[in-house]
Amino acid sequence: MSAPETWDLSRTALLTIDLQNDFIHPEGAYGRAGQSALAIAALPGRVAPLVAALRAKGGRYFSAQFTLVPDRDGEPLIAPHLKELRPFLAKGDFAPGSFGHTVVDTLHPADFVIEKVAYSAFYQTRLEYIMRAISVDHLIFGGIVTNGGVASTLREAHLRNVETVMLTDGCAAFRQDVHEATLLSLRTVTHQMSCAAAREWLEDAI
């Protein structure tokens, strides 16, 4: 893996996974169900300065957003395992164009929105097409959850020979021990750095 300091930042994007209102906002689907975590709520404010720093160097910001596709009656198409795990999900939650589906205000608007229906932001989405269309070769990762959407997308990026940086405190899970175990398991497939270190790298890059 080439050192991030050698990357062309104009060919780099910061990709956040699932930092959207239905996961984070108190009035979103998870907030209404009492499913929240302080570590997750803190992420948008921590990542936003990096988005600004990267854009200042010609880079882009991608927001991958979990999506429940509505049927013709508006009821969401929910995988059986997800319905069992999250029985509170209801009509209108994570629906394209809805408040809950939208990236949180702190990060809004993204340069490109990637609707995803599974853990990975590469699975049956337009992410790879967009990367090729605007010549993005490198990805900086933040978002939720570390062991779910973040890990799945990082591993797929690795399989596609896309070089990545994982923000160690720009990602979070509902349990800190799970977050830390996932960081350890991903060290062979991605660079890792804190948001503070990443901000210094981006702002100092020529």
Image (cartoon, helix red, strand yellow):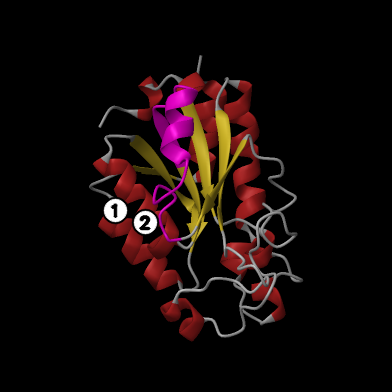
- Report whether 10 appears left or right of 178: right
Judge whether 13 appears above or below 171 on screen: above
Label 2 neighbour load within 10 Å: few <14, some 14-19, many 20+: many
- Report whether 151 appears left or right of 130: left
Q: Are marks 2 and 1 in contact (CB under 8 Å)?
A: yes
- The residue lying at 71 percent from left, 69 percent from top is 28
Q: How far apart, in angstroms, are the residues tagged by discs 2 and 1?
A: 8 Å
Q: Which residue is mark 1?
A: 186
Question: In this view of the protein, which residue sits in the foreground, 199 or 33?
Answer: 33
Residue kind at label 1, given as amino acid type: Leu
| Residue 75 x %, y % | 64, 74
- SS under mark 2: helix
Q: Which numbered disc, 2 or 1, marks the residue closer to the eye?
A: 2
Q: Which residue is mark 2?
A: 151
- Report whether 24 appears left or right of 193: right
In the rendered structure, which segment of residues is drawn in magenta? 118-140
Quadrant of the drawing holding the N terminus? top left
Label 1 neighbour load within 10 Å: few <14, some 14-19, many 20+: some
- SS under mark 1: helix
Judge whether 111 appears above or below 22 on screen: above
- The residue lying at 39 percent from left, 24 percent from top is 5
Question: In this view of the protein, which residue sits in the foreground, 194 or 34?
Answer: 34
In the picture, the disc for residue 98 is none
Instruction: Farthest residue to the front: give it.
Output: 72
Judge whether 166 appears above or below 96 on screen: above
Instruction: Farthest residue to the top: give it.
Output: 206
Location of residue 203 (image quadrant): top right
Residue kind at label 2, given as amino acid type: Ala
Judge whether 18 appears above or below 2 on screen: below
